[in-house]
Amino acid sequence: MSLSEIGSIASIGSFVLAAILAIVQNWAKIIKGDGPMLSKIILILVIIGILGAGLSVYGVYKSRQKLLPQVSMEWKDMQKISVVGKTFVNEKILLDGHSYNNCTFINPRLVYNGTAPFDITNSTFKGQLLIESEKPQIEAMLYALKELNFMRPDLKVYGPHTK
């Protein structure tokens, strides 16, 4: 999150809090219509401000959503190298840009650098499974996934910081 976004959120939050306090303080006068014209003006400004804040938050949300499809569209149209029915024994296997189907992996060292999508379907893994990346960001994500128990406990992770 950028500093300007944090500032916008803090500004919106303080505005909403001030608006709530102004409404609570003048609620009885607003409902009865006894209050001065200032109370009605405050209410109108608060409503406009809340709507504006909502639109601002929605705008930030939509601008971030536009970034996601561009990456996935690039990957969606990417052609992968198809590997079918092959057995790999004690080999280093590049995942980026490959599609492995009905393969057997015995003591594999899987390599993923995040440069292209990959598929592994209907395949079998036997023995020690190692996964590595040359990119520190991918290595960090692999360690996080392992710590969160999203990966096999016996999986070993390697990368620039573990070689």
Image (spheres, rainbow, N blue to C red):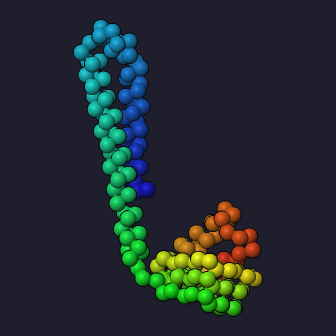
- How many tags in the picture? 0
Q: Is residue 62 left or right of residue 154?
A: left
Q: Dividing the image into 4 quarters, which one contains the C terminus?
A: bottom right
Residue 127 versus residue 31 in the image, above or below: below
Q: Nearer the viewer, residue 11 or 133?
A: 133
- The location of residue 82, given as percent across then percent down, is 51, 86
Residue located at (38% from left, 22% from top): 23
Choose top left, top right, bottom left or bottom right for residue 106: bottom right
- Is residue 136 found left or right of 79 in the rendered image? right
Would residue 162 be seen by someone viewing this image from the given angle? no
Q: Residue at x 58, y 69 (%)?
A: 141
In the image, taking residue 102 as reference, residue 76 lies left or right, namely left
Q: Does residue 3 sit above or below 76 in this rendering?
A: above
The picture places residue 117, in percent across and down from the top left corner, at 48, 76
Residue 78: where, in percent of width, then height? 41, 79
Residue for point 67% across, 69% down: 151
Q: Is residue 126 visible?
A: yes
- Horizontal and vertical percent position of residue 107: 71, 86
- Residue at x 36% of width, y 68% of height: 70
Q: Nearer the viewer, residue 131 or 74?
A: 74
Image quadrant where residue 109 sits? bottom right
Left or right: residue 153 versus residue 117 is right
Which quarter of the figure is the N terminus placed in?
bottom left
